[in-house]
Amino acid sequence: MTRPWLAHYPQGVPAEISTEKYSSLADLLDRACKQYASRIACTAMGSDITYAQLDAHARAFAAWLQSLGLPKGARVALMMPNVPAYLVCMLGTLRAGLVVVNVNPLYTAEELQRQLLDSGASAIVILENFAHTLQRVADRGQLEHIVVTGPGDLLGGLKAPLVNLAARYIKKIVPAWRIDGARMLPKVLRDGAGRAFTPPALSMDDVAVLQYTGGTTGVPKGAMLSHRNLTANVLQTEAVAQPVVHDLASQQLTIISALPLYHVFAMTVCGLYGLHAGMRNVLIINPRDQPSLINAWRKVPINVFPGVNTLFNALAHNEDFARLDFSALRLTLGGGMAVQRQVAERWLEITGRPLVEGYGLSETSPVATVNPTNATAYSGSIGLPLPSTDVAILDDEGREVPLGERGEVSIRGPQVMLGYWQKPEETRQSMTADGYFRSGDIGIMDEQGYTRIVDRKKDMIAVSGFKVYPNEVEAAVAQHPGVLECAAIGVPDEHSGEAVKVFVVKKDPSLTEAQIQDWCREKLTGYKRPRFVEFRDELPKSNVGKILRRELRPDAAAPEAGKPA
């Protein structure tokens, strides 16, 4: 295939990257810990942890995991927001030759159970704020080892117990829980620190992370991301960032993690790339807490800021944020959802730096394309393929369409997943014979290699950068005894990009919107819950009885369609 984008790479960005220097993702991270031992690895709630301390904690956790006798490739679930324990346990899990399973801490008990059963996780590390959810899981599958961590753990000195006590008894944000056999993380680390650790033999083809996604159907499944996939994406990210950070090579950069690290975008760009580059990672536990984010920025000037459109939009309309000093800011990366022109233009006006849009999926580790990081204006496109990456626009038969014509955006490169966990048929359907992953998004590539997304082949709904699949919402709503049938779609929303709307045909004539909302609070995480509910006498269907979501969209897009529930 022709690769027109190579002629438009900024100076210094290579056409190819190589992972040959490293034996595994763990090796890449281990080298960073040694090279940058004296630097600050992360800052959380005003406390700093050095790379040397991160290294020691991760080694202790790896040794403890090894003492459990878990076989290589066993799965370890991490159910935490942005606390230092996440970085420690992620690195320790990888070092022990085990597989990280990222879990959204806001999951309901049903959602958590589904992921535990599918992944076959043997161990879990969970923030105590969410331990009550695990307590309610009826069937934990193969889960045998439960580690609970407090929000203040690893902060050091008196701060750790004070933060934990405040969370439990003053702020009262830790619901009561009791899980027999659960261990607290500080005790686990003390135990592991006294044990021998033998690094296992790892290869680039071993699975490093199971990142759950709806894939091409909306049925939750784990994308198997190998050590090579993630190492490649880290090196690709490093390569495209060079035009704006190369002159700071001798200095420590600061990256802010306002996106949750269990999300693949933040895990790779903030977590893995940040560590590899020896950055100081400012951890924001709750990105909706704008005063805390702004205060953290005020204390530590930020150089690199990955985020999503909704976060940038909210900050761009915050007067306190606009008064910050942005002279240190070099790179703002937008991913997870489309960046809107008005947000990008407002961001440039406030910060003096462009908002650079990229594109990717869980299945691509995740970054596949990005606009030149030294761009000076909003392009409206998802940019150019990363080094060592091919993007093809394919028709339904898998043939490449001419430049300027619509087709399915398809990606081939070292960051493309091994496949879906224990789902060979799903894997086969998502890949072409010559190794392209079919994204489900419809795009147009121009003669320079820039791609613009114009539609979605899938019915996925993007809420603040998180994927919501109609099948999952519909399955939850349909369980209500008063619902005959239902259909879920995404509708425009100025705050979250899109919001979930559900159309319901009643079985029980007395069914109300409030009852459906109450039901969904038990079944679905907040961002998946319908914001709008509309009752209908019937839903549009095909001649074989399949509900046609696309015929619901024109009415749903109108401002008066449905009302907030």
Image: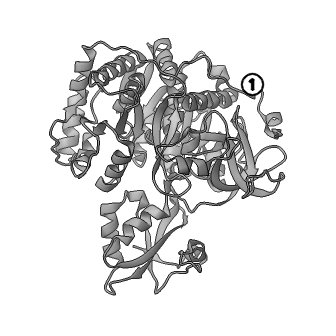
**Residue under numbered circle 1:** 12
The reply, left or right, for residue 261 in relation to residue 493 is: left
- Whether residue 258 is visible, yes or no, is no
Q: Quadrant of residue 82?
A: top left
Colour scheme:
one colour
Q: Quadrant of the C terminus?
A: bottom left
- Helix or strand or loop: what does disc 1 sit on? loop
Above or below 217: residue 379:
above
Number of marks drawn: 1
The percent position of residue 415, horizontal first and vertical second, equals 61, 35
Residue at horizontal 33 percent and vertical 14 percent from the top: 197
- Whether residue 399 is visible, yes or no, is yes
Above or below 413: residue 409:
below
Q: Quadrant of residue 510?
A: bottom left
The percent position of residue 1, horizontal first and vertical second, equals 81, 40
The reply, left or right, for residue 48 in relation to residue 8 is: left
The percent position of residue 288, horizontal first and vertical second, equals 42, 49
Residue at horizontal 48 percent and vertical 78 percent from the top: 562
Q: Quadrant of residue 248?
A: top right
Residue at horizontal 69 percent and vertical 51 percent from the top: 409
Crowding near the residue tagged with mark 1, few <14, some 14–19, many ≥20 C-alpha atoms within 10 Å: few
The reply, left or right, for residue 560 in relation to residue 412 is: left
The percent position of residue 260, horizontal first and vertical second, equals 44, 42
Q: Amino acid at mark 1?
A: Gly
Along the viewing direction, whichever of 74 and 539 lies nearer the viewer: 74
Above or below 224: residue 172:
below
The reply, left or right, for residue 237 in relation to residue 146 is: right
Above or below 219: residue 101:
above
